[in-house]
Image: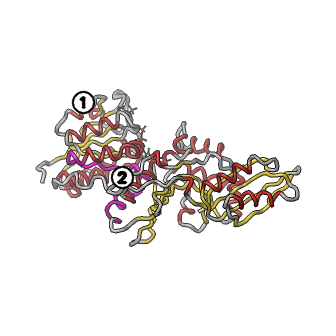
């Protein structure tokens, strides 16, 4: 037991999440003793510009000097909410080395340097918690590590990016295009002015790498994730999805197979009755499958000031209880296996392919034979529209290997009768 009446927290960053954490901790002051067995106060907040006025935050706590935090032995917990790799990584490492436990929401950092940081935390007997780094307010990492520890997990599927889910939901509801809907998302403050990390699937890939590492007990990093974003999805694809009783979602999919870990982020057509199909707007959801529990789905707000603060404060309070009870550093890295990553070329999926072709006798036969010669079995093929001698063909394949569909499309795109390959979307 640590004999302290009050634990001290330093927050690095007073942006969206930092401000939320400040508010939530402030709101809990009367209950802190009951929750953790002692008081807990924020004693410093690190920002770049300490002279900037920040609504609702006690100015006397602000500093732009890291030394005031790392050099203060009374600070027990460092909460990193600055984002990015540096200086966040160095600050976290310094904090752990001086025996301060750390809470972070930083997916960029945990998806690339998680092992190094968790090993350092273990070495110094500290906690390093990062619940908010995946799916904001949704509890998913601690449930995977603790509540579901009795399972062998086989699959995690997630809608883990609110911006892209909002864009695809709006495109589906209103029938409008990607660029127009991205602009709306930016005007509403959902999408960043530089939306690349969201719309190209990079943000989701980081979250999937973190979840896969925990679910399958084997280290998966951001670079292991095959990633495609939503920028090529068109109104026509959405309309065809509707016609097939499906919706298009940006899904993170990871599976533990006998040939290794499959891990991908890409748009996918899913049946409108699948539980993930009704996760709309900026909401996130994670669907997991374990051998004992079966299917479980987690749903909620994946971002935003208070939802994300909810997860961060949950970690702070858990760390505080550990400090009080003298048991920090007991759940470090849980990656005790070394499972290879399955190459994307070997992963299997059903595909939706949309092509513009010459509208003449033999076209369908020629296309079918290219697919057939490349081991791609067709479930459905239909001619949709015909105009000025060209036709739109829609093909749904059976489950086939990525390399076989890629080879087929490479050949098709060189054939004079194929005018363009407009869409290739996987089907769940
Ligand atoms: P943000 O609004 O951009 O705030 C960043 C804060 O960090 C600012 O207060 C900034 O100071 C401070 N900061 C940045 N670099 C610094 C440096 N070198 N030294 C000192 N202070 C520095 O970011 P956010 O949206 O709160 O996100 C914070 C973290 O939470 C990120 O890792 C993000 O991925 C993660 N996250 C965010 C959300 C969300 O909904 N926003 C959800 C889940 C996870 P100034 O104010 O002086 O510029
Ligand atoms: N940009 C993310 C999203 C939130 O749109 O879900 C932070 O992880």
Q: Quick one: SS at disc 1?
A: helix
Residue pointed to by mark 2: 131
- Seen at 33% across and 47% down, the residue is 115
Please determine whether, in this image, residue 376 is positioned above or below residue 387: below
Please determine whether, in this image, residue 361 is positioned above or below residue 126: below
Query: Residue 214: image x %, image y %?
Result: 37, 56
Q: Label for residue 293? A: none
Query: Residue 39: image x %, image y %?
Result: 19, 49
Do residues under tags 2 and 1 come within 8 Å of each other at their CB atoms? no
Q: Is residue 324 magenta?
A: no
- Seen at 49% across and 55% down, the residue is 342
Q: Which residues are magenta?
A: 122-148
Mark 2 neighbour class, 10 Å CA radius: few under 14, some 14 to 19, many 20 or more: many
Within the image, what quadrant is residue 352 found in?
Answer: bottom right
The answer to whether the beta carbon of the residue marked 1 is less than 8 Å from any atom of ligand 1 is no
Which quadrant does ligand 1 occupy?
top left
Q: Nearer the viewer, residue 378 or 178?
A: 378
Please determine whether, in this image, residue 224 is positioned above or below residue 45: below
Nearest to N terminus: mark 2 or mark 1: 1
**Quick check: can you spot residue 307?**
no
View extreme (front): residue: 373
Mark 1 neighbour class, 10 Å CA radius: few under 14, some 14 to 19, many 20 or more: few
- Seen at 51% across and 55% down, the residue is 252
Query: Residue 185: image x %, image y %?
Result: 58, 45
Please determine whether, in this image, residue 310 is positioned above or below residue 45: below
Residue pointed to by mark 1: 67
* 419 left or right, relative to 310: right
Q: Quick one: SS at disc 2?
A: helix
Q: Nearer the viewer, residue 106 or 34?
A: 106
Query: Total number of numbered labels?
Result: 2
């Amino acid at each position: 037991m640590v004999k302290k009446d009050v634990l001290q927290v330093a927050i690095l960053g007073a942006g969206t999440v930092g401000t939320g954490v400040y508010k939530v901790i402030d709101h809990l002051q009367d209950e802190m003793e009951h929750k953790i067995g002692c008081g807990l106060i924020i004693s410093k907040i690190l920002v770049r510009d300490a002279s900037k006025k920040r609504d609702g935050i006690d100015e006397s706590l602000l500093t732009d000097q890291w030394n005031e935090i790392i050099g203060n032995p009374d600070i027990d917990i460092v909460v990193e909410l600055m984002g990015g790799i540096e200086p966040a990584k160095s600050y976290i490492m310094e904090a752990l080395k001086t025996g301060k436990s750390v809470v972070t929401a930083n997916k960029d950092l945990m998806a690339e340097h998680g092992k190094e940081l968790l090993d350092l935390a273990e070495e110094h007997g500290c906690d390093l918690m990062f619940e908010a780094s995946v799916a904001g307010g949704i509890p998913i990492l601690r449930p995977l590590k603790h509540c579901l520890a009795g399972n062998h997990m086989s699959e995690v599927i997630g809608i883990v990016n609110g911006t892209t889910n909002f864009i695809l939901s709006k495109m589906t509801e209103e029938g409008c295009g990607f660029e127009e809907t991205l602009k709306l998302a930016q005007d509403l403050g959902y999408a960043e002015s530089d939306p690349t990390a969201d719309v190209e699937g990079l943000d989701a890939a980081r979250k999937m790498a973190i979840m896969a590492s925990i679910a399958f007990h084997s280290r998966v990093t951001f670079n292991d994730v095959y990633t495609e974003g939503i920028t090529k999805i068109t109104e026509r694809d959405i309309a065809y999805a509707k016609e097939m009783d499906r919706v298009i979602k940006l899904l993170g999919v990871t599976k533990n197979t006998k040939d290794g870990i499959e891990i991908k982020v890409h748009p996918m057509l899913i049946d409108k009755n699948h539980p993930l199909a009704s996760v709309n707007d900026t909401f996130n959801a994670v669907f997991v499958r374990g051998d004992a529990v079966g299917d479980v789905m987690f749903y909620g707000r994946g971002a935003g000031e208070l939802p994300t603060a909810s997860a961060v404060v949950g970690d702070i309070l858990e760390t505080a209880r550990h400090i009080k009870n003298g048991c920090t550093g007991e759940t470090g890295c849980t990656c005790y296996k070394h499972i290879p990553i399955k190459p994307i070329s070997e992963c299997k999926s059903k595909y939706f392919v949309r092509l513009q072709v010459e509208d003449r006798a033999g076209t369908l036969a020629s296309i079918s034979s290219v697919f057939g010669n490349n081991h791609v079995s067709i479930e459905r093929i239909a001619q949709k529209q015909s105009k000025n001698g060209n036709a739109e063909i829609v093909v749904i394949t059976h489950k086939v290997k990525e390399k076989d569909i890629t080879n087929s499309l490479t050949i098709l795109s060189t054939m004079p009768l194929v005018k363009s390959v407009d869409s290739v979307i996987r089907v769940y």
